[in-house]
Image (cartoon, coloured by chain):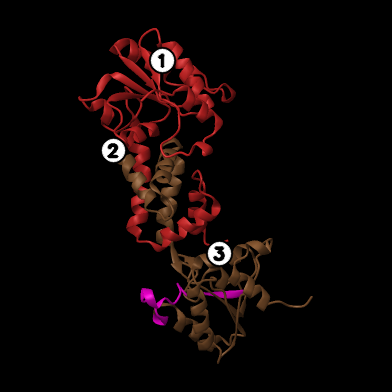
Chain colours: A brown, B red
Amino acid sequence: MGPLALEELITAFARLPGIGRKTAQRLAFYVIKSPRDEAQALAQALLRAKDDLLPCTVCFNFTERGQELCEVCRNPRRDRQLICVVEEASDVLVLERNQLMTGVYHVLGGVLSPLDGIGPEDLRISELTARVKQEGVREIILAHNASAEGDATAEYLSRQLAPFTRVTRLARGLPVGADLDLADKVTLAHALEGRHSF
Amino acid sequence: MGPLALEELITAFARLPGIGRKTAQRLAFYVIKSPRDEAQALAQALLRAKDDLLPCTVCFNFTERGQELCEVCRNPRRDRQLICVVEEASDVLVLERNQLMTGVYHVLGGVLSPLDGIGPEDLRISELTARVKQEGVREIILAHNASAEGDATAEYLSRQLAPFTRVTRLARGLPVGADLDLADKVTLAHALEGRHSF
């Protein structure tokens, strides 16, 4: 095919999730045409992200090398008695970006998935239980994705934690702006079930 | 927001064309979760592509540092009397991948676009004319994109080169597998105009 340096860049891009061969090719040609600074910035950011991002020792959100606690856990104004449990560190970013959470987080690191051989011991559940017991937590909000595995994991956690604290989960219903006739059956069922008076 | 190393990686990905903020975030989290080797391979490929890819001194296709001529121009079995003119080096890759060209190439480096201030002197047209005059070229195939600028550039080149050699262009018509009722009017007009007997 083309020169080796070009093929290697296309192959490296195509290894990223959701990037097909054609997109990888487009990205590679863009990089070759753009200033060297830009390629260097991406190359450095890649290595720095790999080397400098570590899990927070309390909640397993990302923190930078040299900081044992993440930004949220370091913040003295966050409510330590309210823990929001999420599947991945990326979920923390979504909630933080929207500034919706006054409490702190706990990143489970995935969902229970017996078919993939992922059981409770593969997630950070014992660490969560320890936090709940130690810190006198007022409420645990289970903010799992609305998937079958997310639901099953939430069910499991609520059973584990209910003896120690209040456990809640995010509401299901129509997303803002949604048309009724475009909503799927399960979403509609949740919306009806969770109906409330004005 | 999140840790600096994470933000930097998301920003660097989002600078690539067609990569929005959400996709950039997904890519960044993928990189952080995947083995360091993979991030390093992409980082190295980025820098190597910037540093090692140079234009072929004859056709302006990409060649690697240390090779004055590209792979196509180096190949003694390619027909040097047949030059396929393309807009970008990426077009060479497409044609080579499909092994459709027995001749060599000439990469113009863009299209004429008076509105963007791109005139004939901004493209590698004088180099093309010089090749045609020197090498005794039998045929020039203009393989421009089917855009207004591609058409205008092809028209311009055909006027310039017609005194010296035969100038042809790619056929327009229905792409293979296309339904008549989905084809646009201009494509249909081209298909009709270019009709031929069995």
Q: Is residue A49 magenta?
A: no
| Amino acid at the residue labelled 3 | Leu
**Disc 1 is attached to a residue of which chain?**
B
Residue B193 vertical placement versus A76 (above, below): above
Residue at mark 1 to residue at mark 3: CA–CA distance: 54 Å
Q: Which residue is mark 1?
A: B126
For the point 52% across and 56% down, the residue is B7
Residue B67 vertical placement versus B36 (above, below): above
**Residue B129: horizontal and vertical position, in percent?**
38, 13
Viewer-nearest of discs 1 and 2: 2
**Residue B149: horizontal and vertical position, in percent?**
52, 25
For the point 42% across and 51% down, the residue is A19
| SS at badge 1 | helix
**Residue A23: horizontal and vertical position, in percent?**
43, 45
Q: Quadrant of the N terminus of chain B?
A: bottom right
Label 1, residues with CA under 10 Å away: few <14, some 14-19, many ≥20: some
For the point 55% across and 71% down, the residue is A146
Q: Quadrant of the C terminus of chain B?
A: top left
On the picture, is A174 further left or further right than A10?
right
Which residue occupies the foreground of this view, A198 or A132?
A: A198
Q: Quadrant of residue B163?
A: top left
Q: Which residue is mark 2?
A: A1
**Disc 3 is attached to a residue of which chain?**
A
Which of the numbered marks, if any, corresponds to residue A194? none
Q: Does the rendering let one see residue B123?
A: yes
Q: Residue furthest bottom?
A: A163
| Magenta highlight range | A102-121
Q: Which residue is mark 3?
A: A93
